[in-house]
Amino acid sequence: MNNSKYVVGIDLGGTKILTAVADMEGEILAKVKRPTEAKKSKDIIFANIKETIYQVLEKADINVEEIAGIGLGSPGPLDVETGVIVNPPNLELKDVDVEKELSEFKVPVFLENDANAAAVGEKYFGSGQDTKDMVYITISTGIGAGVIMDGQILHGADSGAGELGHATLDPHSDVQCGCGNYGCFEVLASGTALSRRGREAVKERKDTMIADLVADTAEIDGAVVAKAARKGDKIAKEIIDEVANYLGIGLANAINNFNPEKIIIGGGVTDSWDLFAEKVERVMKRRALDFLVKGKEITTSQLGSEIGVKGALGVVLLRLEK
Amino acid sequence: MNNSKYVVGIDLGGTKILTAVADMEGEILAKVKRPTEAKKSKDIIFANIKETIYQVLEKADINVEEIAGIGLGSPGPLDVETGVIVNPPNLELKDVDVEKELSEFKVPVFLENDANAAAVGEKYFGSGQDTKDMVYITISTGIGAGVIMDGQILHGADSGAGELGHATLDPHSDVQCGCGNYGCFEVLASGTALSRRGREAVKERKDTMIADLVADTAEIDGAVVAKAARKGDKIAKEIIDEVANYLGIGLANAINNFNPEKIIIGGGVTDSWDLFAEKVERVMKRRALDFLVKGKEITTSQLGSEIGVKGALGVVLLRLEK
């Protein structure tokens, strides 16, 4: 290690770039946010990224020479080993070598997919600080996961380990997932599942207030179903119950596969986790092996919208440790 | 490292103990087998283990002082970190500290569960030699697995990672597994599943030759169903097809969870794998994420009954490397 004293973390998302600089203990000194302009070109996206780096350094009064490394969390698929973003669905980036794009900073650039970066965020800044083996699962419109085993990110052969959102959870399901498969954990237990079941209930003219909460059925999303359930709506509660059952099965499977000390739940579902928690835990405990689930905890992420950038910072710190 | 030049591997099973000594390149110099006497006492079981060690050393003309370490593969649950066998169902062993029991050899003793040891056997001696990330799945009366990621065994918090045989594969199934859960991968896709479905077919008086191949329906096992299918029996073929479908889903889930380069199948099912292979691969490819399954191979283990002892040898070599 030279006399570099700071690390830069970048959360590259489909709508915004959030960049932060921290010291080697992970203390954040400054943050900068700007639009990604994801649908423009690679050059524009990377010009935007570089702009946030220079801005954040200026804000914290740090010279480029004092930076030890840059961490970049990005939607996948990507290749962690070669540092190449392959072809994320929502970004105009194809086979982009991130170290080359950021070569003017003359430091190592560590690429990580966003769910793995979030898991590292929990490990460095959140509820995973005291664990060696943990699974972070983000549940919003989709389900993504990052797995940390023995303190390291689980990558697998194509940086694709932990794609448990696309594991088949119900082989008889005729609900197709964006990935092409039927009955994935993601289509049965994400916000998309809540929204789909809510719309179906309205279409089938079930006795529910769900439709009354929106101007148009197209607006029915997970939050709307959760709101109806909170108001005592029986149909909404049944939908929550059904999705909680699938969530419990998916978490039990994660426990049997990875044997984590802790499961941390992030994403949109955390806002209404209290509606799901009891059933999820009950199903998980019934379905997972006793010796693996005993004493294990589910917690919800407390890092909010900063989990991505904190994760990107954690990724640099973790990789520089090696 | 001192001038020790050899390692001892022990495959501790419910019926037999198989012990081997090898040099540091894994070249096996001698082997010894004897009954476990599993239902007697801890003292008798360990006296038997020690006997095989002294015998194998004598056979290879090696002194105790030349041994660098001992690897012990045992049924779980067990704790790899503390080296304690907790309470395996088929062995009269409870909370046994293996290094203490084998302390007279004055070398480190590395404990590993049998499925993980088998995975290491494949890595050192079998079809996993060229891989960093692989999943070994043994399919006999049950389904066990050992996962190797980045060249290391995946352990998790309780040495229980890779218990994918007990992941729920069909949430609607009313078939109960020995673990207490319903619809586990193991009850739907193991030899036990073939045998159960075969017996059901006979009981339901379906048009099948399965009953003709045995003296008593209690004798119907996976091999009998496979034999009937080979003779063209339509019902037996349907059962194989159903089980192959579940196997394909289970392997797709393993790919999405762990992203291995290779899946290696071991256990009794390998004898009739040709009956399953095509359907398993088809279902697996349809259900796993494209970028994870593309170019990935399923192979069957070629190590036969020596996989356990070779695995135990591999475990010592792997742990001494660290």
Image (spheres, coloured by chain):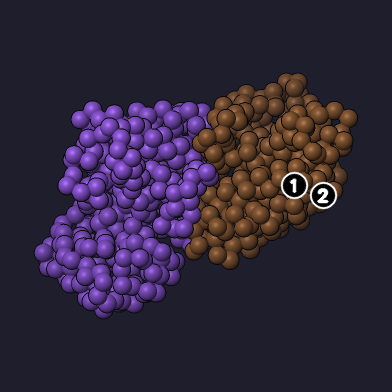
Chain colours: A purple, B brown
- Residue at position x 22%, y 63% from top? A15
- Secondary structure at badge 1 equals helix
- Residue at position x 49%, y 40% from top? A253
Badge 1 and badge 2 both on one subunit: yes
Nearer-the-camera pick, B316 or B12:
B12
Image coordinates of residue B192 in percent, x first then y, are 70, 35
Marks 1 and 2 close (CB-CB < 8 Å): yes
Q: Does the rendering let one see residue A208?
A: yes
Q: Does the rendering let one see residue B152?
A: no
Image coordinates of residue B246 in percent, x first then y, are 61, 45
How crowded pointer 2 is (Cα within 10 Å; few <14, some 14-19, many 20+) is rated as few
How crowded pointer 1 is (Cα within 10 Å; few <14, some 14-19, many 20+) is rated as many
Q: Is residue B213 left or right of residue A115?
A: right
State how many labels appear. Answer: 2
Amino acid on which the number 1 mark rests in the picture: Lys
Q: From the image, which quarter does the C terminus of chain A lie in?
A: bottom left
- Residue at position x 29%, y 29% from top? A234
Image coordinates of residue A60 in percent, x first then y, are 13, 62
* Pointer 1 residue: B237
Nearer-the-camera pick, B87 or B106:
B87
Labelled disc at residue B232: 2
- Secondary structure at badge 2 equals loop
Image quadrant where residue A83 sits: bottom left
Labelled disc at residue B2: none
**Chain that bears disc 2:** B
Q: Earlier in the sequence, mark 1 or mark 2?
A: 2
Nearer-the-camera pick, B145 or B157:
B145
- Residue at position x 76%, y 35% from top? B206
Amino acid on which the number 2 mark rests in the picture: Gly
Q: Is residue B208 above or below residue A120?
A: above
Real-space Cα distance between discs 1 and 2? 7 Å
Q: Is residue A103 left or right of residue B132?
A: left
